[in-house]
Amino acid sequence: VTFADDSQVVGGYANGEIRRWKILGRQQQGPIMYASGLVESVVVSQDGRWMVSGDRGNKAIVWNAVTHEKVREFAEHGGWAHGVDLSSDCTQIVSADLRNAQIFSITSGIRLPPLPHEGVVIGKAPLAWSSDGQQLFVAPRGKIICFDLSECSSSEWLIHENQSPAHIASNGRFIACAAGPSVLLWDCVSHKQICSVITHTEEVKCVALSPSGGYLACGNGRNITVYNLRGVLSPEYFDHGVSLLAIHEAHIANNHFAA
């Protein structure tokens, strides 16, 4: 699941479908997109121009976010493309399989040297890109690895004690990390936890942050729950230039609105 903007979410399906939904009213927006296999992850660029999906057909696919037409496929993965994200300038994508994170140019298709990562469990290789494009976060079981692309270095810190597969999203200021039924928020710079645990009754299988950082979406396979974080975090963690809908929490239980 991901946000298209502060009023719409995009969900990926086990049958390869990708659908965009309006949060209030639960209406599907635009035609269905079809990936090459079960959709592992999906993101939307900050300028609203691109969507990128990663799937079990070993492909990362770039879509036109307005028309939902396929723009480019990247099939260089040695396995399922578990995680995808876009750079802040909307010119590059990063996708991850079980062993490597790979960066591609959207326009030219050129691939940069892969970034190997260790300890990723089968079926889970979530990642997120910082807003300045200089840090790439990968979350194997029990930890987050931060690749500093400008310094060609990496660091890591431990996260959830339950050792469940992790799912992450970032707005460049903080990281939302789900493992099992719990979601924690971490500061990107200090690597410190910045709020109490958000607990669900079921395992959280994907998370997303709205462009402003004001909303957190959690999907468990059938339902998407959207939280307003502005009453939880200090103002420094949000983009003040984006207007927000006056909703606090929306529970969406339509089976066709699943992540």
Image (cartoon, rainbow, N blue to C red):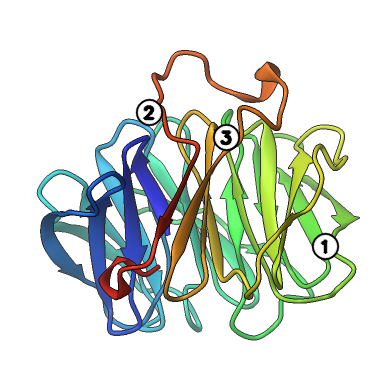
Q: How crowded is the residue under tag 1: few (<14 C-alpha within 10 Å), some, or many (20+)? A: many
Question: In what element is the residue under mark 2?
Answer: loop
Question: Does the residue at mark 3 contact the one at mark 1 (Cβ under 8 Å)?
Answer: no
The residue singled out by tag 1 in the image is 143
Question: In what element is the residue under mark 3?
Answer: loop
Q: How crowded is the residue under tag 2: few (<14 C-alpha within 10 Å), some, or many (20+)? A: few
Q: Residue at x 28, y 36 (%)?
A: 48
The residue singled out by tag 2 in the image is 245
Residue 9: percent from left, percent from top:
34, 50
Question: Does the residue at mark 3 contact the one at mark 2 (Cβ under 8 Å)?
Answer: no
Residue 102 visible within the image: yes
- Residue 172 falls left or right of residue 78: right
Residue 147: percent from left, percent from top:
73, 48
Q: How crowded is the residue under tag 3: few (<14 C-alpha within 10 Å), some, or many (20+)? A: some
What's the amino acid at mark 3? Gly
- Residue 87 falls left or right of residue 127: left
| Quadrant in which the N terminus is drawn | bottom left
Residue 68: percent from left, percent from top:
14, 55
What's the amino acid at mark 1? Lys
Q: Residue at x 38, y 34 (%)?
A: 46
Q: Nearer the viewer, mark 3 or mark 1?
A: 1
Quick one: label 3 or label 2, which is nearer the N terminus? 3
The residue singled out by tag 3 in the image is 133
Tell me how far mark 2 sits from mark 1, CA to CA: 33 Å
